[in-house]
Amino acid sequence: MQKLVHDPQDRIERIDEFWAAVSVDGNGQVLCATRLNGMVIPLIAADDSGLIWVKEQAEKLATLTGRRIKLIKLTGRVEFEELWGAGEGGAPIPRNP
């Protein structure tokens, strides 16, 4: 069973766009990630403060690897599936139609 490792209180009401760092080479692009406290964290952000951190990490990664890294902005939200789990104590979460 996985444990939720991060549950920020400063939530965004609706994420309609986000930024990501991608490494680019002759074979295409790949999403960049970094290690933090033993975890692999993808370089993505949904707000300006997160984007600052992503850019800092992407710059470090580019310097360390010598690779070209692009910061891209993704827009055009499409919700294609909604997954439901149990609430606190295993109680079902009420579903809104």
Image: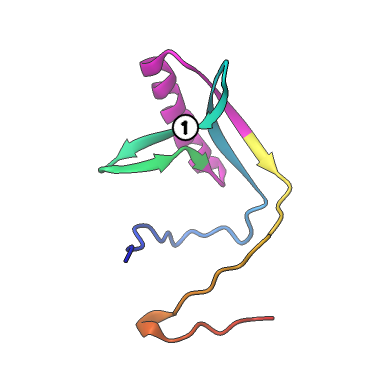
Left or right of 17? Residue 5 is: left
Q: Position of residue 75 (x, y in %)?
A: 70, 44
Residue 34 quadrant: top left
Which region is colored magenta? 45-72
The image position of residue 80, as x and y in percent, is 68, 60
Secondary structure of the magenta portion, mostly? helix
Where is residue 91 drawn, in percent x and y? 43, 86
Asked whether 65 falls inside the magenta stretch, the response is yes
Q: In this view, does 53 lie above or below 6?
A: above
Helix, strand or loop at mark 1: loop
Q: Which residue is found at the position 46% from the left and 27% from the top?
A: 58
Q: Is residue 80 left or right of residue 24?
A: right
Q: Within the image, what quadrant is residue 12 found in?
A: bottom right
- For disc 1, the marked residue is 32
For the C terminus, which image quadrant?
A: bottom right
Question: Relative to 74, is 25 on the left or the right?
Answer: left
What's the residue type where badge 1 is placed? Cys
Q: Residue at x 56, y 41 (%)?
A: 48
Classify residue 24 by image quadrant: top right
